[in-house]
Amino acid sequence: MSVVKGRLSADLTAPGVAELVRHLNRDGALCIELVDNDGNVVTCAGGCAGSCSKQCATMRSRLASEVLNTHGPCCGSCEGGGRIEALPVMHSAAQFGAVLVCEVPAGLRVPAPGNGIQTTTGIDPLLNSLSLLVAQSSFYELEVRSLTSDLSLRYEELALMYEIGERIPIRAETASVIDYVVESFKDLVNYDAACWVPAGSKEGLNGGEGEWVRWIDSRGEARSLDRDVRRVSRAIAERVASGGSVLTVNTMAADADTQQLSETFSAASGYPVAVEEEYYGTLVLFKFQGDFKSGEAMLVSAVMRRSGTVIRNANLYKELDEFFLNTIKALVRIIEGKDAYTRGHSERVSTFSMLLGNMLNLPLSEKEALSRSSLLHDIGKIKVPEEILKKPGALTAEEFAVIKEHPGFGADMLSPIGQLSHCLPDIRHHHERIDGKGYPDGLKGDEIPQRARIIAVADTFDALTSDRCYRPKFGVEKALQIIEEAAGTQLYPEAAAALVSNKDAFLEHVEAKSVTAEESDRN
Ligand SMILES: [Fe+2]
Ligand SMILES: [Fe+2]
């Protein structure tokens, strides 16, 4: 017979049992006892409560054990000659324990022969009613607890779903999304180790790219098992990926793929992270003790499904961003194609700007904007006639006036593109000078956007180290000397100092092909 084990509560049963004994126990010789599924006394009331002889207690214990194992009634005799009846406390295939009633007939206080256990069908109707009542109330208490626990898990699940959607950055890498999620449910799901197996992870000493093992417990000896955890996790991941659903192994010793870790862990469970045809990987959780409950598995499964959506959105965003950036690069190459001397200038200025952005510790969002602005800084040159751009030698004042229009024109032509709105000030002001003698607006110092100041340093360095139609390139040392001399007047001193003191980082990007800082105004 398959029964579910429930818990008997002393709080729930003690008052009723005591009242019943008071009502029935006219001569003080009736005792009612409730034991839980482990045979421990939960409630005991009546004449011999707490003062039973050893023999009587032994008999009760034997009867209780019999009832708990057979789920059927039985009876026996107690030391005082009384009869002990025992009955399981059951309701809807859930067993909560056993109820025992010991009644010594009035006047009989001597041991009776034959105190063995007998099966019986002639149970006192009162005992039957008591058993049923206790079982029903215990069952409903169990239901309420289970519902409360489920409700609590569903609430936490919803809160986690919201958090995952809100807190994970749109461009997060897959492994860091999973890492964040696993951390976020550690107080709700009782796991001791987690392993992320990305799709396509191969056997290896340190696992596949992006694969990781995280331990909740700080046991040092357990961490030395990382390699085994990876191996077992990959085996589970393979089964999860082929089945497409959650896999729970609550008896690891009996499972060929997990038994090698069964002395360390009691249970393992694997969860797919996928969206439609895209399979991103499998999360495998391990427990030192106990099983993975269905409520826990449901919560993790739902959260991992949500993570799959977050990962897919992040990948789509990255693809879109890359497409946008490549489109910008193609546009810039078309414009630079007008002048063989400036070919590759914008990409090098972007590379130098990013190096400076890193050296000045710009936040990620600033660096992303800097990357686009620096690539597009000279886009306005599309309006400058080729004969001016390619003119060898000095420009006339009129020609230079045309050149000076390119920053403003570049910003104006890109203004309809909303995604570039934050880049427009950088493009417009990349020829401003710290001393206010630049163009188009004559801004000074901090009035010039920081990204535009950085681009100006990168732009000047590339101009100085590249051949132009009007002069050959300078040597790197001479270029650095010019940059250093222009710091604080023409150029942003912090960026100029970063470039000069980290020159080796820039050298490999310098064009293999000479100007004063003023002459770089044409770039
Ligand atoms: Fe420019
Ligand atoms: Fe430039």
Image: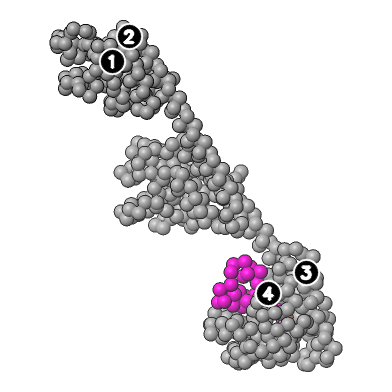
* Label 1 CB-ligand 2 distance < 8 A: no
Kind of residue at badge 3: Leu
Taking 394 as reference, is 195 left or right?
left
* Mark-to-mark CA distance, 1 and 3: 91 Å
Sequence-first disc among 2 and 4: 2
The circle drawn on residue 101 is 1
* Mark-to-mark CA distance, 1 and 4: 89 Å
Q: What residue lies at 70% left-to-right and 63% top-to-bottom?
A: 324
Taking 362 as reference, is 143 left or right?
left
Sequence-first disc among 1 and 3: 1
Using the image, determine if residue 88 lies above or below residue 522.
above
What is the chief secondary structure element of the magenta stretch? Answer: helix
Determine the quadrant in which ligand 1 lies. Answer: bottom right
Name the residue that disc number 3 marks. Answer: 414
Q: Are marks 2 and 1 in contact (CB under 8 Å)?
A: yes
Label 2: how many residues lie within 10 Å, few (<14), some (14-19) or many (20+)? few
Relative image position of residue 1 (x, y in whole percent): 37, 19
User: Would residue 337 be visible to someone looking at this image?
Assistant: no
Q: Are marks 1 and 4 in contact (CB under 8 Å)?
A: no
Kind of residue at badge 2: Asp
Q: What residue lies at 57% left-to-right and 76% top-to-bottom?
A: 360
